[in-house]
Image (cartoon, rainbow, N blue to C red):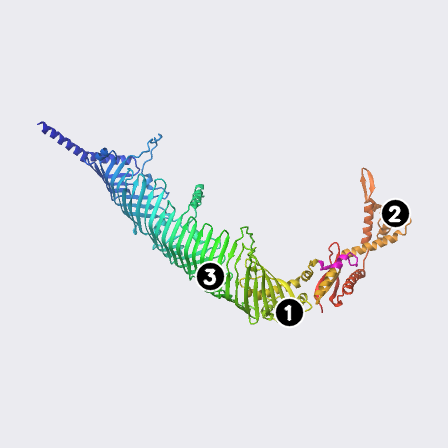
Amino acid sequence: MKNNKFLKILITIFALYSLLGFFVLPYFLKPKLQELINENITKQAFIKDIKFNPYTFEITLLDFKLKDTKETILSFDEFYIDFSLFKTIDKKHIRFEKVLLKNAFINIIENKDGTINLTRILKQKNNNNKKQENSSNSMIDFLIRKVIISNAKIDFKKLSDTEPFFISFNQLNYIFHDLGSFKNMLASQNLSTKINKNTLLTLKGGFKLEPLSMYANVNLKRLKPSELILYKKSMFNFDISDKTSLDLNFGYQLNFKDKLDLTIQDLNLFINDFDLTQNKNSLISFKNFNINSLYLDYLNHKIDINTIQLNNLKADIQNSKEEVINLTTLVNKSKQKETKNNKKEKTQDKSLLWSINLNNSQISNTNIKYKDLKTTNKINLNNLTLDLNSFKFNNNNLFLDTLTLKEPKIDFSNRKENLKVKIDNLKIDIQKLSKKDKEIQIDTINLNKDALFLSDKLKNQIITKNINLKVENLNFNNNTLAIKKSALIKPYISITLPKKTNSKTTKKTDKKKVVKNSKKTLDLEIGPFNIKNAALNFEDKNLPIPFKTLVSKLSGSFSEFSTTSSKPTELKLEGKVDKYGYTKITGLVNHENIKELTDVNLLFKNIAIKNFTPYSGKFIGREIDTGKLNLDLKYNIKKSNLDAKNSIIISDIKFGNKVKSEDSVSLPLELAIALLEDSNGIIDLDIPISGNVDNPEFSIAPIVWKAFTNIIIKAVSAPFSFLASLLGIEADQIKSIDFHFADAKILPSEKEALDNIAKIMVKRPNIAIKINQTYTKEDINKLKEIKTQKKIEKTMKEFSKGDKYQLALEKLYLSYDKNKTLDKLKEKFISKNKEKKIFQKEKYLIYLKESISSKQIISQKTIENLAINRIKNIKHYLINEKNIKENRVIIKKLKESVSNKNFTNFELEISVVK
């Protein structure tokens, strides 16, 4: 009976426990839990049912919803927790066997004011009591054996009038096993979700909390960047095509034990059909961009990449009139100032040294357009292919096995300058490029160019053919550039200037400031440079008579030279000019300044100057009938520009018929020849010639004639400067003859000027001197003074007593104005000093003399006699003492001029003997 009673008690307890656990507790717990939740949130929560197993301690919440007045914010169909009570007690840690969340839904909304709806779910409570800090930093041990999130969905919506945005993570499934706080416990995880309609994201891996570390394989497929940029559309001033997709897969390992240790393995990135547009205009597009097999080791700063490929890149770059490049406007700039911390972080990032290995990179079929609206420059680069193999970068050291630029088509134009440049089939091949510390080494550089064409709308043309340049063993180290050897073989260059139309264009020249470079001069160690069978053709159709010349069979070499060695470099070039002309260039390079060539001779022999008739016709409107040109030039070269002191001998030059030319300058050629030509009919000049040392033959014709024309212009416009240079004196020493006022005597200083003029007239027998005879007001005033003095001396003889000089002045003064009295005049020269009257006699006498002098009259005959005596003395000195022929001294009419305050000047002019 007792056993039956005990059994009944047990059954009753079991029944009551079951009733309480399965039915009573859920019944009372549901409203209490719902009430508790609603008391602490601003929204309304609903729980359909709660199930509890009092024996296994499994609890399930069914059909939970969190709503506001408009829509559901959070919901799930089932939330199941399997709490292992007995193992928790036995193992002394919190333990869950399983956690399951089915059909969860989270609706995240960003309001127009930027707040997130989830942040406003909990009610804010005023709590003045400070929270007590937990003195223990130890983590409570726990273990969750399995967590399953099944078919979850997360929606994010941005409410905005200007940039609304929506993204959905649906079909989200996440499972992990063995998540716990125990050391070295590894939890596995699997994640898969669909982003919007097209993108798939999967993640498979694991992690542990102590120490914190994780690993995974990530796979992202068909990501649409166009869907993501809508979130911050105001930041981006561009659109991305809906066809653009991104695929990414990689594995990673991440550890946080001591330092951040991140490795990324086998990363593969594929971007397809990329098209970035601005205002419906495509700026950047490409068919595909691939990165294959990237490995990254963050701790050791190492990146290995197998291949990078970029295909069918197209770029449309435009620089506005305000000099704003369109690509810089893609992202709207933030007005926030950069913080100091950000600046420090950037500085630190620059100090990190990374090792980068790239096996292969190829950019193929690249097309780039560039347009500058301000300068009107326009560049089209089409069909560019760039291959790069075995690129390595380690601790700022670099190695590249090969770099090849293949056959791009380049078009350049400038509307303002009417300039066009076209380059086809260019190929540059670089082998074995390396950079170690500050040393750069290139084994070989090959540049091949079949044809280069430059022209403008006026059909000015430069054509090059068969450019074959090879450079071997280029090295740069310690500010020294070394090249073992190089060669240019059979190049042909043709330059054609067509006949221009009558339209006139004006060009504005910008003055460029010369900036002095204070950097250390580059040292060069260049091996021999050979030129074989070069040909240069020049044709100028823009002349009344077309000009054409050819320098052919131009061969030679530059021997080895070094700026760090005293050994000079030998230069040898030899070629043929037109039919009978000859040119030879020899010399040495001065290594103390590599930009200057010293002792270099450029010899041109037997050049028919008649060939320059096209230029004489254009610039001075005359043909050249006869004459020969011989040039013996000594070059100084700075930055490849000629600065030459040249001996140019022109013999027996004779000008012929006139040529009509709008560009011709009206010059007194007879005067110019008289100034330049000596008694033997030879013009022997030392004049500067500028040009380019790479092709001096091309520039020889226009440069020589331009220089000759400039000398003519300089000579006839400033003949005294030109003639004075023959004696090494200043032009002011021979431009005029000075006389004392009212005096015809030649001063000793002016005899030197006349001596120099006589010497010049001997050197230039065909010139004449014109003398401008003049008189000045100072001459007349001086003549008046002389006349007054004579009258004073004569009048003084009339007095035997008293101050004869004063009496004479007073008598003469009254003779010109009898109405005046001397007493009144003297009162003007009486001053009072302490009630004492003082007569200023000296001022009184000066006044009388000046008054008398002003009354004197100088006749025109007297002035003319003064001029005649002056001319007579000059002619006598030149003709009688210096043996100058009388017809070479020409006297011009007398005229009044302004003095130089000290002397009267007889200005001189240069003329031609008739």
Query: Which quarter of the rendered picture does the C terminus lie within?
Result: bottom right
The disc, 3 or 2, on the residue closer to the chain's N-terminal end is 3
- The answer to whether residue 661 shows anywhere in this view is no
For residue 651, which numbered disc appears in the image?
1
Q: As drawn, is 120 to the left or to the right of 578?
A: left
- The image shows residue 329 at horizontal and vertical percentages of 43, 51
Q: Residues within 10 Å of mark 3 (few under 14, many from 20)?
A: some
Question: Which dot, 1 or 3, sits closer to the camera?
Answer: 3
Quadrant position of residue 884 = bottom right
- The image shows residue 58 at horizontal and vertical percentages of 21, 37
- The image shows residue 340 at horizontal and vertical percentages of 45, 41
Identity, as a three-letter code, of the amino acid under mark 1 = Ser
Q: Residues within 10 Å of mark 1 (few under 14, many from 20)?
A: some
Please, which residue is most extreme toward the top here? 2
Secondary structure of residue under mark 1: strand
Question: Which dot, 3 or 2, sits closer to the camera?
Answer: 3
Please, which residue is most extreme toward the front here? 567
Q: Which residues are magenta?
A: 733-752
Disc count in the image?
3
Alpha-carbon span between mark 3 and mark 2? 104 Å
The residue nearer to you, when weighing 27 against 659, is 659
Alpha-carbon span between mark 1 and mark 3? 44 Å
- Residue of label 3: 470
Identity, as a three-letter code, of the amino acid under mark 2 = Asp
The disc, 1 or 3, on the residue closer to the chain's N-terminal end is 3
Query: Which quarter of the rendered picture does the N terminus lie within?
Result: top left
Q: As drawn, is 863 to the left or to the right of 98?
A: right
Asked whether residue 147 is drawn in magenta, I would say no
- Residue of label 2: 803
The residue nearer to you, when weighing 719 against 399, is 399
The disc, 2 or 1, on the residue closer to the chain's N-terminal end is 1
